[in-house]
Structure formats: C-alpha cells, structure tokens
Amino acid sequence: IPTVPIYGIPFSNLTMQETVQWLTDVIEKKQETHVITANPIMVMAALDNTSFMQVMNQADLIVPDGSGVVWAANVGGQPLKERVTGFDLLHELMKAGETRGYRVYLLGASPDVIQAAHERLHDMYPGVQIVGSRDGFFGPAEDEAVVSEIALLEPDILFVARGADTQEPWIAKYRHRLNSTIMMGVGGSFDVISG
Ligand code: UDP
C-alpha cells in the first residue's frame, strides 16, 4: 500500500474506491486486518502517548479520516489522494457486502443506539448478514465474554464504536482472538446511523 507519513504515522494514500477494493480482497483472503480511521486528535494522542503510538503502529491500514490529516499531508509536500472517513468507509463496506453476503458484527454505543443502528443497517443492506451486536458500555471484566461471543460468530467485519481512546487499544489487544477478518473503529458512527 502506498503511504504518506504524517508525524511518522503511515497514512494510506488510496482513494475510497481503492481502499474498498483492498479491503474486499483482504476479506477474500481472510487476512486479519486492523483498520484505523485516524484524525489529527489521534495523531496528537499517539505523539503524546507511547502505548497509543504502539497501537497505531500495529494497525494494518491507517486511513485519513480527518480533513486536518489531508491538510497536513499537503503542507508536508506529499499530498494524499483523498480523505476517507470512517463513516463513509463503513457504508461502502456494507454496500460491498450486499452482493458478497458479508457477516458483520456491530459492537459499541449505548444499548438503545446499537439496537436502532442494527435495525437501520439491516434495512439498508439486506444482503449483509448482521450476525450480532451489543453495546459498548462494559468493563475489562466482561472482555472475555464479549470476545468469545464475537469469535464464535466469525464475522468478516467487526465495527467497534467505543471512542478512539478505547476502541483502538481494545482491538489491538484482542485482534488475534476475535476470529474477525476486518476490525475497524467507527467512533460515533452508530449514533449518527441510529438517529
Ligand atoms: N462509547 C461506548 N463505550 C464507552 C464510551 C463510549 O460504547 O465506554 C460509545 C459512545 O456511546 C459513542 C461512541 O462510543 O457511540 C463514540 O464516543 P465518543 O464520541 O465519546 O468518542 P470519540 O469518537 O469522540 O472518541
């Protein structure tokens, strides 16, 4: 993947269409992949915090979610082709999953929000199998139960919405045990979809 470094973090230099193509190939090959859709706040957090930088470094694909990232790349003289937001990428992957029958698990947000987002996405993308969903308000003591439930369902895509500071370290910690091909943090996306 072509990348552009921003403060040392390698952002993928792909259009949305190229990103979706790369990720559908990844699903076909069942190649475990952590996608981070990063904004400037996450870049700053990584520069400030070694363990968050390690989380960024173990990701397989870092896409430029924020317009500030695209701006910084321009200023740095190595422009990025396009801004690729997590929200748009979620929808593009669901669209791609329509014909391919992807198995998708939705994790995060409040119980009301995740239930509404589950129903809404099911109506929008009937060809996608939403194999499960649960809210994102649980502590480390419940991690084992959550990880086991997801692992049994073997999703092609696991979307996690628990806020950037929680969702990305959580994926990095459990990625090898989740039996999921693509794992991607989606921040506040379920709140937007549910409303
Ligand atoms: N969230 C969650 N568990 C938590 C904290 C947040 O599921 O312990 C959800 C929250 O309900 C929202 C999403 O994570 O749907 C993003 O939260 P927020 O906007 O606060 O995080 P940010 O994207 O600003 O980091």
Image: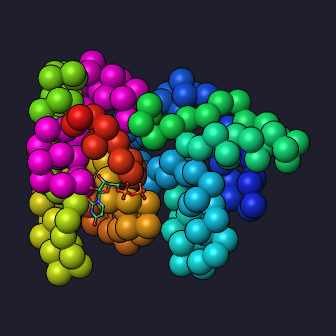
Quadrant in the rendering for residue 46: bottom right
Which of 19/64 is in front?
64
Q: Is-magenta flag for residue 144?
A: no
**Where is residue 66 drawn, in percent x and y?**
59, 44
**Where is residue 194 drawn, in percent x and y?**
22, 36
In the picture shown, does residue 67 fall above or below 127?
below
Q: Residue furthest front?
A: 195
Q: Residue at x 31, y 37 (%)?
A: 192
Is 138 placed left or right of 35 in the picture? left
Q: Is-magenta flag for residue 109?
A: yes
Q: Residue at x 68, y 53 (%)?
A: 10
In the picture shown, does residue 183 fall above or below 74?
below
Quadrant in the rendering for residue 45: bottom right
**Where is residue 168 drawn, in percent x and y?**
42, 62
Q: Quadrant of the C terminus?
A: top left
Magenta-drawn segment: 90-117
Task: Report if residue 141 is visible in the image.
Answer: yes
Task: Report if residue 172 is visible in the image.
Answer: no
